[in-house]
């Protein structure tokens, strides 16, 4: 049993939308395939992965560093103890050989993308959905029912309040009970009008979360916190720079409601510093670490250990990214749910075709691996790469 090839292609996921910090007019993702010599049900086992939106494709790093480390590793050294499957932890160690600690930069995204494909291949070889494989490995009960929320509300050329209301109503019509919109890209008075319009539209049918994408300095963050605390929000997300833990801690004194952050923290050490210095509150706040951007599931397991040490439940984790990898982690390891993008970043976001949202929850299908094969538009793009 061995990996015979690792293939990467950079794909566009461009859109005219913007948040408070960036636009997505030139956004890309890396699509990767980890090809094995294993045959299951008459088909070669290939694991697939891609990186989440908001960080660009990592083709250079994948092709120039990490691909060769996988292919040049002794095939027996990256198998599990039984020798009957790939060992994602040993493959992760091979990828990270000769890498200095700290300064994560973009390599965390490259490794996270490949890690996704490796776990997909390993679960397919085991003949199990990844979420059930993870639950068994960790001695916990899998829960195929996962909370999801609809992320949208971006700034868009010509998008008025009526269009914003229509978008949010559309998410409710598809079964979501929590919706999210962007703030911080216009002045505070205009954002207040946008929030009022959405809350008027959704009424008691759903909850609203808001996301500043790290835009605010302390003064602006406090002004928004004072404005937002008048509303019954699901959460106030990523007010300031993700590494400015003192800003996050200061805002907790002005905003008593739930806050969320973490999508731009890329290691278990970063997570530890957030919990040490960011005044995050385990009874109400949410952590949004995204395995596809932060060295993959192998590192995410270390992050969950850090949370445990600080008295946090994995149920306070609701990952960024809207991809099926995090859905499997949520179902297998008891996370609090997952982001989803019903209309954006396709075909990479969303769920298998048979899955629907009901009262804010989806039920994971029993598909081997991550379940990409259940999403027709996505698997067709993936198979063009390596099958």
Image (spheres, helix red, strand yellow):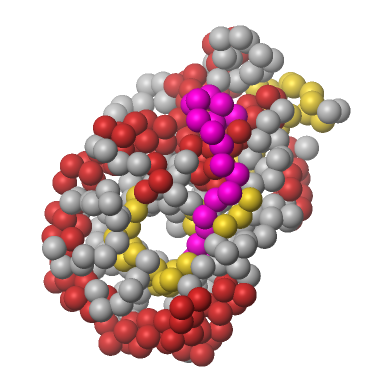
Question: Looking at the image, which residue is at 46% across and 82% down?
Answer: 203
Q: Is residue 24 above or below residue 103?
A: below
Find residue 213 and report its horizontal and vertical position in percent: 34, 64
**Residue 55 visible here:** no
Depth order, front residue of 271/96 = 271
Q: Is residue 352 above or below residue 216?
A: above
Depth order, front residue of 282/299 = 282
Query: In the picture, which quadrant includes the C terminus?
Result: top right
Q: Is residue 8 above or below residue 214?
A: above
User: What range is drawn magenta here?
Assistant: 133-151
Find residue 9 and report its horizontal and vertical position in percent: 62, 45
Q: Is residue 121 magenta?
A: no
Find residue 375 and report its horizontal and vertical position in percent: 72, 52
Q: Is residue 361 above or below residue 75?
A: below
User: In the displayed structure, does residue 189 sit left or right of residue 40?
Assistant: left
**Residue 374 visible here:** yes
User: In the displayed structure, does residue 355 sit left or right of residue 155?
Assistant: right
Question: Looking at the image, which residue is at 45% across and 57% down?
Answer: 54
Depth order, front residue of 44/340 = 340
Q: Is residue 148 magenta?
A: yes
Question: Looking at the image, which residue is at 23% across and 44% down?
Answer: 275
User: In the displayed structure, does residue 45 sit left or right of residue 321?
Assistant: right
Query: In the picture, which quadrant includes the N terminus?
Result: top right
How many numbered discs?
A: 0
């Amino acid at each position: 049993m061995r990996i015979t090839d690792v293939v990467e292609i950079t794909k566009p996921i461009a859109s005219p939308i913007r948040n408070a910090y960036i636009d997505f007019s030139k956004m890309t993702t890396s699509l990767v395939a980890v090809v094995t010599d294993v045959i299951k049900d008459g088909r070669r086992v290939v694991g697939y992965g891609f990186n989440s939106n908001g960080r660009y494709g990592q083709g250079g790093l994948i092709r120039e560093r990490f691909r060769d480390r996988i292919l040049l590793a002794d095939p027996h050294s990256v198998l599990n103890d039984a020798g009957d499957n790939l060992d994602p932890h040993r493959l992760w160690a091979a990828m990270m050989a000769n890498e200095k600690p700290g300064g994560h930069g973009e390599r965390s995204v490259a490794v996270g993308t490949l890690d996704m494909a490796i776990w997909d291949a390993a679960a397919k070889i085991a003949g199990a959905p990844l979420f059930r494989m993870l639950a068994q490995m960790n001695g916990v009960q899998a829960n195929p029912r996962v909370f999801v929320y609809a992320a949208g509300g971006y700034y868009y050329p010509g998008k008025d309040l009526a269009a914003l209301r229509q978008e949010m109503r559309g998410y409710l019509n598809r079964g979501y009970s929590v919706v999210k919109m962007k703030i911080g890209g216009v002045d505070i008075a205009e954002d207040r009008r946008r929030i009022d319009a959405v809350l008027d539209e959704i009424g008691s049918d759903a909850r609203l979360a808001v996301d500043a994408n790290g835009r605010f300095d302390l003064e602006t963050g406090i002004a928004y916190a004072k404005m937002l605390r008048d509303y019954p929000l699901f959460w106030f997300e990523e007010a300031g720079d993700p590494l400015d833990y003192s800003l996050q801690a200061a805002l907790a004194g002005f905003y008593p409601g739930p806050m969320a952050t973490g999508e731009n923290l890329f290691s278990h050490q970063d997570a530890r510093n957030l919990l040490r210095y960011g005044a995050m509150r385990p009874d109400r706040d949410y952590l949004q670490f995204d395995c596809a951007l932060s060295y993959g599931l192998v590192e995410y397991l270390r992050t969950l250990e850090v949370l445990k040490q600080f008295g946090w439940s994995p149920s306070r984790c609701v990952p960024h990214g809207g991809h099926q990898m995090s859905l499997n982690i949520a179902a297998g390891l008891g996370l609090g749910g997952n982001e989803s993008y019903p209309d954006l970043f396709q075909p990479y976001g969303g769920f298998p075709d048979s899955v629907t949202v009901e009262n804010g929850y989806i039920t994971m299908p029993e598909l081997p691996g991550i379940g990409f094969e259940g999403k027709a538009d996505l698997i067709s793009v993936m198979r063009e790469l390596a099958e």
